């Protein structure tokens, strides 16, 4: 009667476990990159909403003293490395955020037409 595993059996099981881990890594890494992109997009939208809330109700003017959106706009995702606000006019703003570890590396929001664009 046999009571233990042979070296070949242990090796085969180890190879199967290694293949499973290797094959499951790629989908997890891809999902993580997509999650970083979505988190960055969401953060930029939140900054845009916060800026819109601070518009002067009578003139529509924006608080142009805000140029850095890394702090003061809620919890920033770790993927967002830089975030700037520029004002092409009194009534418009552009938010640009750089992302690290995402499928795309930049998110841009333009208030003039309300577009949110993700760039490589």
Image: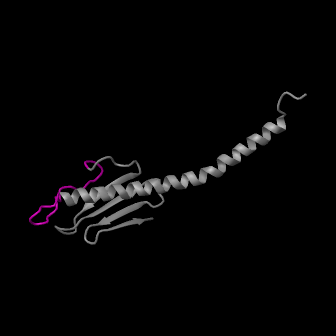
Residue at (70% x, 44% y) in the render:
18
In the image, 10 versus 95, the foreground residue is 10
Looking at the image, residue 11 sits to the left or right of residue 75; the answer is right
Residue at (22% x, 58% y) in the render:
51
For residue 92: magenta?
Answer: no
> How many labels, in total?
0
- Horizontal and vertical percent for residue 16? 73, 45
Q: Please identify the quarter of the rendering in which residue 40 is found.
A: bottom left
Magenta stretch bounds: 54-72
Which quarter of the rendered picture does the N terminus lie within? top right
For residue 62: magenta?
Answer: yes
- Coloration of the structure image: one colour
- Horizontal and vertical percent for residue 86? 25, 62
In the displayed orientation, state which residue is furthest to the right: 1
- Horizontal and vertical percent for residue 11? 79, 39
Image vertical order of residue 5 relative to residue 99, above or below: above
Residue at (19% x, 69% y) in the render:
89
Looking at the image, residue 117 sits to the left or right of residue 60; the answer is right
Looking at the image, residue 67 sits to the left or right of residue 116; the answer is left
Image vertical order of residue 113 relative to residue 97, above or below: below
Q: Please identify the quarter of the rendering in which residue 87 is found.
A: bottom left
In the displayed orientation, state which residue is furthest to the bottom: 113
Looking at the image, residue 94 sits to the left or right of residue 36; the answer is left
Residue at (30% x, 50% y) in the render:
70
Which quarter of the rendered picture does the C terminus lie within? bottom left
Question: Main SS type for the magenta part?
Answer: loop
In the displayed orientation, state which residue is furthest to the left: 58
- Horizontal and vertical percent for residue 54? 17, 57
């Amino acid at each position: 009667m046999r009571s233990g595993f042979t070296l070949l059996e242990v090796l085969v099981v180890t190879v199967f476990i290694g293949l499973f881990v290797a094959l499951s890594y790629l989908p997890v890494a891809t999902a993580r990159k997509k999650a970083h992109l979505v988190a960055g997009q969401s953060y930029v939208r939140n900054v845009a909403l916060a800026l819109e809330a601070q518009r002067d109700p009578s003139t529509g003017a924006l608080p142009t003293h805000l140029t850095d959106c890394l702090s003061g706009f809620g919890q920033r995702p770790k993927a967002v490395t830089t975030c700037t606000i520029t004002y092409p006019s009194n009534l418009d703003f552009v938010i640009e955020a750089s992302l690290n570890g995402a499928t795309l590396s930049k998110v841009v929001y333009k208030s003039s037409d309300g577009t949110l664009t993700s760039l490589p």
